[in-house]
Image (spheres, rainbow, N blue to C red):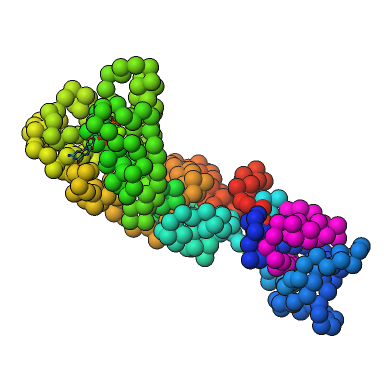
Amino acid sequence: MILKDTMVAIATPMGVGGIGIIRVSGPLSEEIARLLFKSRKQVDNLMTHHLYHGDIISPETGAILDEVMITLMRKPHSYTGEDTLEISCHGGPLILQAVLSEVIKAGARPAEPGEFTRRAFLNNRLDLSQAEAVADLIMAKTERGLEAAVSHLKGELAKKIEFLRTSIIDVLAILETSIDFSEEDADIERNSEIAGTIQAVVDELHAILMTYERGKIYRHGLDAVITGKPNVGKSSLFNRLLGEKRAIVTPIPGTTRDFIEEFIVIRGIPVRLADTAGIRYPENIIEQEGIALVREKLSLADVVIIVLDGSDTLTEEDIEIIEKNRTRKTALVINKMDLPRVINIEKVRQLAPDLHPLWISAKCGDGIPALKEVIYTLAMKQEDNRQATVMITNIRHKTAIEKAVVLLSQARNSITGGLSPELPALDVREALDSLGEIVGKTVNEDILDRIFSTFCIGK
Ligand SMILES: Nc1nc2c(ncn2[C@@H]2O[C@H](COP(=O)(O)OP(=O)(O)OP(=O)(O)O)[C@@H](O)[C@H]2O)c(=O)[nH]1
Ligand SMILES: [Mg+2]
């Protein structure tokens, strides 16, 4: 499918840079190059995938707008699969705007966000999971996030999904041919064989789903919230983990009024760490508001770090904080280990038998590396031992796989329950479509709009 019009965009970020690139795609690409580009040497025919040095000229005035390098890439060997022109200008916003408007005057229209990649998809240069990987690649914040995106871009997710779809298509073929036969012909052995095939696909899909949590963490990072009653050393711990004095620390309980957030990286995972107001019965409206904010932060946290003061007695406030977070992924920290021990550690153990309290000193730095390890382990918990070959990080992929798992499980139950093949055939067909959405085999315009609108212009 070759789309008719020609589009253009500035493909490099706005602002001043060494070079700035203007990207043109569509049937007018070559004509635009002929009209605006003047080489120093005589060039009769622009060769594809060759770099030419020259000037961009305004055809009306003959004025030189910039000295540039251009490359023409003839279809289908270009990113979009269409004729494409790239103009490398000097990277100043005014220069780029001037060249851009000449290209528009010459017949191109401004591209929408992600439109180059959208055309690459429509022209079968990329499947949808690869197109999405392009956006992920650009946005990746960690090395592991980048690795996952590169693997998708190389088509590994698509390959895996296609492989599973082929198994399902085989099942569907058997089911559909058996619809034509009467009940008596139902073959028990054949039924258990296709139920087995479906189960194997469901297992693989499950394993891929399990990678989502981990994938999400690599892509978006995780939220960790430090909580505890006032004065236990939450802000001191926050500063310690951050490696700088970011939060105010004083001996006065109630120093932190709302919350402060900063990013830290633990073993390649971006962690959004929040220091919060100490939780106690609020003394005034400011504190009341602060504590309400803490509760909200806590409800959204992936990991909760509860801080107790080892140099003080355990209080009702400590007990309540531990109990309220019983179901969460929690790191229990006992601070101020440099001071004489007062806390009743037995009582702490009784309260939280499944948490191993970690002794630290925010003041001196003891126990901080161990705490980072605990945060990492908590983040990675809940993982399954089953190994998946690809990792998913995208909610759209997750939803499509989940839907397929439900439908396939339903189909398997119908088959083993001896129901007539029409029913499971319908479910299997729908599951096939759902998986097809991942690679873009069965996808509607709305989904495409949603995906590509998150791209930047020029990509
Ligand atoms: N000796 C010792 N003192 C500490 C340690 N950590 C914090 N402190 C002291 O405890 C006091 C309170 O520390 P903060 O970090 O402000 O405590 P907080 O939990 O943020 O307090 P609020 O913001 O009021 O809830 C300060 O005087 C710190 O210097 C520690 O490991 N050892
Ligand atoms: Mg504080």
- Residue ID at (43%, 56%): 142
Quarter of image, ligand 1: top left
Q: Residue at (56%, 54%) from the top-left corner? A: 135
| Magenta residues, start to end | 82-111
State the image quarter where residue 332 is shown: top left
Q: Quadrant of residue 106?
A: bottom right
In the rendered view of the protein, which quadrant contains the C terminus? bottom right
x 19%, y 26%: residue: 319
Q: Position of residue 215 (x, y in %)?
A: 41, 52
User: In the rendered image of this protein, does residue 188 appear above or below residue 96?
Assistant: above
Q: Return the residue nearer the eye: 271 or 111.
A: 271
| Residue nearer the viewer, 12 or 84 | 12
Q: Is residue 179 left or right of residue 260?
A: right
Give x and y (percent) for residue 88.
Answer: 70, 68
Q: State the quadrant of the N terminus.
A: bottom right
Q: Is residue 248 magenta?
A: no
Whether 248 is drawn above or below 391: the answer is above
Specify whether residue 192 is in view.
no
Location of residue 454 in the rendering, given as x and y in whole percent from the top left corner: 60, 47
User: Furthest residue to the top?
Assistant: 284
Q: Is residue 37 left or right of residue 444?
A: right
Residue 84 on the magenta segment = yes
Whether residue 267 is visible here, answered yes or no, is yes
Residue at image position (80%, 65%) is: 65
